[in-house]
Amino acid sequence: MTPVVEPANKVKAAYGLMQSLDDEPMLNFDERDLLAFAENAGFKEVHLDYQVEISPGDSSNESSTDWGTFVRSAPNPLSPTLEEAMAGALTPEEAARFTTHLRPLVERAERTSRDAVVYLWAVK
């Protein structure tokens, strides 16, 4: 992202303005909080499985390399899409430069996917 660091930083800042992490119910906790919530609710047996996957983009999955899908996707249901964040943060010229740099990377699957999932089950 070095060639477009200024617009990238503006888009990142726009996400922070559009969605404060402090009051975001999908993001303002971690796995330790989940354990505490379960214990405080009276569960005596608690299991937690935390899975992290970091992998290169998957070019075999056509939707993962489709620019329209990528730009109209959001990190979670309450977050703005990349398209919305760009529209709110960038001038048309900055958006064009940002897109010109990012779109080929997406279409060639030259990115890293980072996913974290926590599975919690408990017995009272």
Image: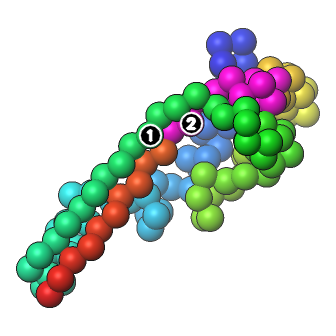
Give the camera-side residue of 18 and 3.
3
Q: How far is disc 2 from disc 1 in space, using C-alphas?
A: 8 Å
- Magenta stretch encompasses residue 103: no
Furthest residue toward front: 60
Q: Callout 2: helix, strand or loop?
A: strand
Give the camera-side residue of 15 and 49.
49
* Quadrant showing the N terminus: top right
Q: What stretch is highlighted in magenta?
A: 104-114
Q: Which amino acid does label 2 sit on?
A: Ser
User: Would you say the residues marked 2 and 1 are in contact, meaning their CB atoms lie under 8 Å apart?
Assistant: yes
User: Against 118, is 13 above or below?
Assistant: above
Q: Mark 1 points at which residue?
A: 53
User: Against 95, is 61 above or below?
Assistant: below
Q: Which amino acid does label 1 sit on?
A: Glu
Image location (x, y in percent) of residue 35: 20, 66
Image location (x, y in percent) of residue 3: 72, 12
Give the camera-side residue of 87 and 117.
117
Q: Mark 2 points at which residue?
A: 113
Q: Callout 1: helix, strand or loop?
A: strand
Residue 27 in the figure: left or right of residue 14: left
Give the camera-side residue of 82 and 20.
82
Q: Which residue is drawn at 34% across and 63% down?
A: 119
User: Against 13, is 51 above or below?
Assistant: below
Image location (x, y in percent) of residue 48: 24, 62
Image location (x, y in percent) of residue 70: 76, 44
Q: Residue at x 83, y 39 (%)?
A: 67
User: Against 81, is 64 above or below?
Assistant: above
Q: Which residue is drawn at 59% across and 58% down?
A: 76
* Quadrant showing the C terminus: bottom left
Q: Which mark is residue 94?
A: none
